[in-house]
Amino acid sequence: MSLCKWVSFLLIIRLLNSSQISSSSSLTSNGFSQIPPKFLALAKRNDFFEWMVGIRRRIHENPELGYEEVDTSKLVRTELEKMGVSYKYPVAVTGVVGYFGTGQAPFVALRADMDALPMQEMVEWEHKSKVPGKMHACGHDAHTTMLLGAAKLLKEHQDELQGTVILVFQPAEEGGGGAKKIVEAGVLKDVSAIFGLHVTNQLGLGLVSSREGPLLAGSGFFEAKISGKGGHAALPQHAIDPILAASNIIVTLQHLVSREADPLDSQVVTVAKFEGGGAFNVIPDSVTIGGTFRAFSTKSFTQLKKRIEQVITRQASVHMCNATVDFLQEEKPFFPPTVNDKALHMFFKNVSGDMLGTKNYFEMQPLMGAEDFSFYQVSMPGHFSFVGMQNEAHSPMASPHSPYFEVNEEVLPYGAALHASMATRYLLDSKTSSPSNSKDEL
């Protein structure tokens, strides 16, 4: 960092420490408002940007599935060691939890997910996935890089932090509930707020979006085996057809939302898996179907789960078949809805507005997608947001979970700076409003 930038940043922080700022005005004071654009300028330096790009591409070339992020977590630990950041490992199998600052309260956490998806990358470029059948198709390679970038920014100013920052490099977000295991490990028991973000192709570069309250739905998965009696397709009277039974089950499941749910209470039931039979002229003994269900309230989610099981087992019986239903909670735990804390959302709007301008914040509608970040929000106040990466001059980018998904690497400085700004501003504001917090220690 150049001498003038270093001196400028120190002057800002010294001004903050010497000012008597009330809790109601602290987030909009002149000194506090200069921190986000300063971090963004630092993250956009050529050397800093190229460092982040290199990390992101190394992670992208070696995608690892949930709880298998051995090399990814090793890379994270290596970079943290270079920065002089202490960490705990392993946490939640392959997770890494870094921490630095005063070691005292207040404690704020920043989270990034590390896992990839079981799909073949179709994008042809120099740093394409080198692992057949695995790909970073949801931006987790970018998320991990952004958090490492934030760590580097914050570490350079560690002496100015007014509390402790916890860095959560989490495994297994894609259905494995890695966040749940992180919480159960107890490493966040003293944290008073946690922040997470996700890249999106639905917003232009330099734009952000979120909302107060319900943001993403709660989700669960189900798999059912419908068993009948196999036979020759030309003699169906001597068989019990599980394909016919499964087909009627799928149609009836759609009625759960269209005819049983309140139209103003968003819910989804989707059957996305259907396996059965291997020949054109043979009725199979059994069929397996599977899918997901989503809702924004615990009551609606519980009712959907109950009715899914009833529909599958009873419709199977109508067709003289038997059915068993597995909700896969051991390997794919139910995700609670992602609900943003009201106060933290206002805080996010202030910080992002100072960094990008208030015109670059967009209020979003709730989405039926799901995020295991919600497990943190059950245990502590939390906020989740989206950072745009679409280059308006180029054709629309592919959506997440597509084999053609790409990351516009120009988004990396925005994510790193936003993470660093949220942590720094949160600690400063907490310190000025709650001086007694310093009694607790890590």
Image: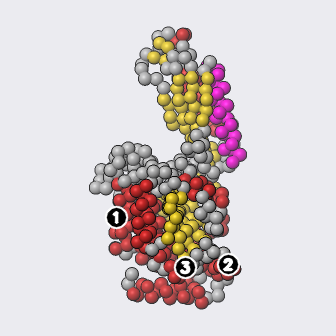
Q: Is residue 298 left or right of residue 389?
A: right
Does residue 371 show up?
no
**Residue 322 position within the rendered picture, expressed as x and y whole percent measured from the top left:** 61, 23
- Among the two numbered marks 2 and 1 on one chain, the one whose residue lies closer to the N terminus: 1
- The label number, if any, that marks residue 54 in the structure image: 1
Q: Which residues are magenta?
A: 298-319
Residue drawn at the location 34% of the way across and 74% of the way down: 47
Can you say which quadrant of the picture contains the N terminus?
bottom left
Q: Amino acid at mark 1?
A: Gly
**Residue 253 position within the rendered picture, expressed as x and y whole percent measured from the top left:** 61, 33
Q: Is residue 323 above or below residue 74?
A: above
Q: Main secondary structure of the magenta part?
A: helix
- Among the two numbered marks 3 and 2 on one chain, the one whose residue lies closer to the N terminus: 3
**Residue 360 position within the rendered picture, expressed as x and y whole percent measured from the top left:** 50, 67
Quickly name the residue at label 2. Answer: 439
Give the Cα separation between the discs numbered 2 and 1: 41 Å
Quickly name the residue at label 3. Answer: 161
